[in-house]
């Protein structure tokens, strides 16, 4: 069945996974990350429920991307505990996927970028056409991946992330510097993944996107979680001056 | 300082050499073709073997972080400057009748020349490929870790994605091999119709005083090297047009 939306993207929905989803909830306790004398994350404490989309926002340099990498197991905290329902981040990495702000695409064709991941993870390589159709890139299948436009490249990175059917999908500013149509296309794919039960953790500076996508919000400021809560409550009445300043576009001095 | 008479003599030699080189190539001189063929056979085989050994080593060092890695890099880089005569001498000692591998009877055969050239250029291939692949690995490392790839998968992916950059590495190895004379003359012996290659033939003709023939062979060697370089460069340019470099 084809699904069309306002972006013009013809996305084919992927089948719902039958695998047990056992990585959540996530518990983060007093996680600190230091580089030498510089503390970039300071006693971060978080609890994330089993479903929905958590949007992480905060000023540049607040530590959002580093927090994502810690949760995904790409970095080790200096101290503190991250617990994915009894597993360490490193034990949970294989059931997760991360889409970087600047997509890292292999020097191969579009289809081969997907094929590579399916092969490496021992998954059915016949799914490549479905995954490409899902993100509206079937017609670019044989084209070199690095000649794709920014929006197409990010859609391919998303398809590659979805290829492993992760329980948790991390997105680190996936729509930064994309045009509005590309932004909506990415959001449509992510929303569809969320609807299929995938847990989404999205870092963004786009407050419109945060309002559209968020079920709950984590506001990071100067390496600390300054606020966490349901999205409507956060956007309607932020509790901290830093969050109010951020939402109003005031740069804290 | 050269005087006019000497300059004229050199010019005359070069003119003669160019004419002779053209005549040799155009006439399809069988001796020349044999020498060129053996040179290419020995150097290309050594390059392939060096790539089979050196590329995985380069990729492993590019992706691994271990104690003493800095020292390994210094040694790898230093080995790029291996003196050919020393390599030739060591291979000679191993392959000579009284050496540990003397029973193989390989001394003064093209195989011995391939072994010597392989030893000579493997460090070049390993060190240069490490450099190429490490730059690629910096770009891919986090994505690979996110995908939970094994080390073997990472190395395979790097070698495949870096294949066009590695062509240049192979080319550097081939260039060193085909231009090398010290090692092949020791282990090959420059035997006519058996182990005579372009460089050893040039050395021989120079020592005999037939400078025109030596220069002609040198010109043919340059043309061969230029042809291989041009072929590889055209492959790289095609790849660059497709953003695969």
Image: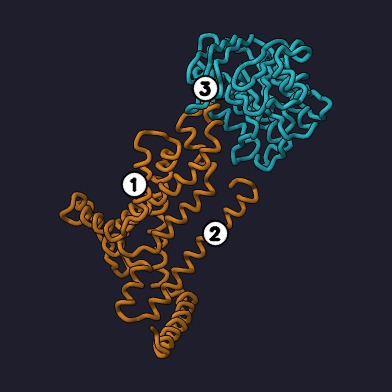
The disc label shown at residue B46, or none = none
Which of discs 3 and 2 lies nearer the camera? The answer is 3
Give the residue at x 42% y 86%. Answer: B7
Residue on which the image places disc 1:
B75
Spatial separation of the CA atoms under disc 1 and disc 2: 32 Å
**What percent of the width, then of the height, locates residue B27?**
47, 77
| Nearer the observer, B90 or B220 | B90
Q: Residue at x 38, y 33 (%)?
A: B66
Question: Label 1 neighbourhood size at 10 Å, few (<14), some (14-19), many (20+)?
Answer: few
User: Which element type, helix, strand or loop, lies under badge 3?
Assistant: strand
In 3D space, how far apart are the residues under numbered discs 1 and 3 (Cα atoms)?
36 Å
Which residue lies under the disc numbered 3?
Answer: A33
Disc 1 versus disc 2: nearer the observer: 1
Label 3 – label 2 distance at C-alpha: 51 Å
Q: Colour of chain A?
A: cyan
Residue drawn at (60%, 54%) of the image: B237
Picture quadrant where residue A238 is located: top right
Display coloring: by chain
Precedes in sequence: disc 1 or disc 2: 1
| Above/below status of A152 relative to B171 | above
**Helix, strand, or loop for circle 1?**
helix
Q: Is residue A60 left or right of residue B76?
A: right
Asked whether B181 or A246 is in front, the reply is A246
Q: Is residue B227 left or right of residue A224?
A: left
In the foreground, A141 or A58: A58
Chain identity for the colour orange used in the image: B
The residue singled out by tag 2 in the image is: B231
């Amino acid at each position: 069945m084809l699904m069309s939306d306002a972006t013009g993207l013809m996305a084919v929905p992927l089948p719902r996974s039958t695998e047990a989803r056992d990585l959540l909830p996530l518990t983060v306790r007093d996680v600190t990350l230091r580089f030498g004398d510089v503390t970039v994350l300071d006693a971060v404490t978080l609890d994330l429920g089993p479903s929905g989309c958590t949007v992480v926002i905060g000023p540049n340099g607040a530590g959002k991307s580093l927090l994502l990498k810690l949760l995904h197991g790409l970095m080790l905290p200096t101290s503190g505990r991250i617990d994915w329902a009894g597993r360490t981040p490193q034990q949970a990495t294989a059931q997760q996927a991360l889409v970087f702000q600047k997509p890292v695409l292999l020097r191969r064709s579009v289809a081969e970028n997907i094929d590579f991941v399916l092969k490496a993870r021992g998954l059915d390589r016949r799914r490549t056409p479905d995954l490409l159709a899902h993100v509206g890139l079937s017609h670019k299948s044989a084209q070199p991946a690095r000649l794709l436009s920014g929006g197409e490249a990010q859609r391919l990175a998303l398809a590659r992330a979805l290829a492993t059917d992760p329980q948790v999908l991390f997105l680190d500013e996936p729509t930064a510097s994309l045009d509005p149509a590309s932004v909506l296309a990415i959001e449509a794919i992510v929303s569809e993944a969320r609807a299929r039960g995938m847990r989404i953790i999205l870092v963004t500076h786009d407050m419109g996107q945060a309002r559209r996508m968020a079920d709950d919000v984590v506001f990071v400021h100067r390496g600390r979680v300054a606020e966490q809560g349901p999205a409507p409550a956060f956007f309607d009445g932020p509790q901290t001056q830093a969050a109010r300043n951020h939402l109003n576009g005031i740069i804290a001095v | 300082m050269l005087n006019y008479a000497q300059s004229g003599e050199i010019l005359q030699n070069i003119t003669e050499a160019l004419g002779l080189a053209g005549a040799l190539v155009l006439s399809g001189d069988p001796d020349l073709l044999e020498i060129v063929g053996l040179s290419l056979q020995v150097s290309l085989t050594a390059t392939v073997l060096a790539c089979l050994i050196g590329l995985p080593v380069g990729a492993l060092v590019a992706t691994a972080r271990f104690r003493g890695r800095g020292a390994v890099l210094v040694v790898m880089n230093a080995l790029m400057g291996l003196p050919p005569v020393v390599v030739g001498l060591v291979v000679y000692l191993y392959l000579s009748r009284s050496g540990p591998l003397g029973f193989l009877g390989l001394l003064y055969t093209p195989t011995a020349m391939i072994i010597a050239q392989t030893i000579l250029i493997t460090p070049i291939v390993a060190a240069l490929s490490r450099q190429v692949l490490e730059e690629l690995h910096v770009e891919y490392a986090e994505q690979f870790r996110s995908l939970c790839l094994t080390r073997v998968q990472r190395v395979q992916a790097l070698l495949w994605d870096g294949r066009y950059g590695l062509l240049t590495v192979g080319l550097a190895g081939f260039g060193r091999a085909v231009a090398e004379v010290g090692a092949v003359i020791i282990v090959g012996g420059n035997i006519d119709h058996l182990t005579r290659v372009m460089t050893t033939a040039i050395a021989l003709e120079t020592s005999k005083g037939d400078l025109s023939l030596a220069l002609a062979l040198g010109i043919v060697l340059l043309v061969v090297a230029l042809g291989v370089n041009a072929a590889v460069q055209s492959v790289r340019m095609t790849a660059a047009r497709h953003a695969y470099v």
